[in-house]
Image: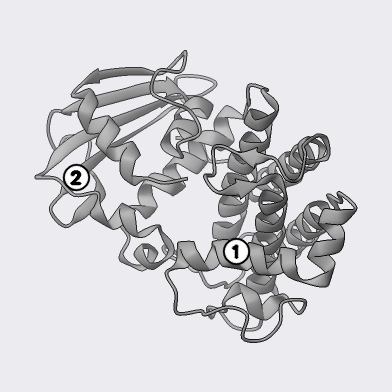
Amino acid sequence: MYKPSHERLCEEIAEQSGHLAKALARLDFAGRIDTCPGWTAAHLMGHMHTAFVWATGILTSPGAEFHPPHVFLSEIPEGALDPAMPWSHYVDALARAYLNAPSGERAVEERLVSPVTDSADAFVAALQESGPDAPAWTTYGEPRSRFWATWGALEAAVHRADADIALGVEPRLDPDVALNSLNFWFTSMGEPGVAAFLNPRVGDLRRSGELILFQGDGTSPARSGQWLLRLSPSGPAIVAPDSGRPDATVRAPADQLLLLSKRRLPVTAPGIRVSGDVSLVHHWLDHVLA
């Protein structure tokens, strides 16, 4: 499967963040983002700002150690967050705490998108400065900065899609980067270190060993990917392609498959083909939250 270069991923982060900022500028900050239940456009802006600030802090801190995002956000008052809460709740509360801080309140009042563009620029600069092989804390895999380039491209693309969908625009993503993001996302499912950073419902994605095959089409046959996931009693994990006949198969262009796998598109969207046990795919989607 084709893997974009570190520089290509940096370019994608910058491009998608720019698209996101333009879309946010057209949205009512109080308007709902239906693909992220409970969020408004302001919350989406705050989430992206805090996420990029965190990643930049991880890349620029000495040593490859974990630091929670709020330590890099001086505008959030000390004690405003409980780092011990489940990660998905913490990330949600982090964006809200930023929006309640003076700088966040000003951004909302003046409908600023600069928090997103400025933090994205700083993140890309940190990635370019570090290169792909600098030591960095990661949730799984080799603890190198290339992890954060892939993470950033996925984060920027999916949340750019959130804003597009809110505007009624069909999101279109680079197929090669989408394939790379799919591999990152599906691989993370079975990694023990990732569980603490996923919504608790992902941990309940258990069955008796059923198999779902996800197939993504890229720009050419050489640039395509497939992932066979087993839903075992201990949770989901990628298994070898010859591990058995899939109980369900999902095929789609890479960008659509990524948005489906992150619950931005329904299984009924044009271009998505599902065969076999459709209820198994719905079970997957019911547990993999946005």
- Relative placement, left or right, of 65 versus 246 is right
Label placed on residue 145: 1
Residue most extreme to the bottom = 78
Q: Earlier in the sequence, mark 2 or mark 1?
A: 1
Badge 2 density bin: few <14, some 14–19, many ≥20, Cα 10 Å: many
Residue at 83 percent of width and 49 percent of height: 113
- Look at the picture and state if 55 lies above or below 184: below
Q: Which residue is mark 2?
A: 231
Q: Residue at x 44, y 27 (%)?
A: 224
Say which quarter of the image contains residue 251. Answer: top left
Name the residue nearer the viewer: 87 or 133: 87
Q: Amino acid at mark 1?
A: Ser
Q: Nearer the viewer, mark 2 or mark 1?
A: 2
> How crowded is the residue under tag 1: few (<14 C-alpha within 10 Å), some, or many (20+)?
many
Q: Residue furthest left?
A: 208
Q: Residue at x 79, y 62 (%)?
A: 122
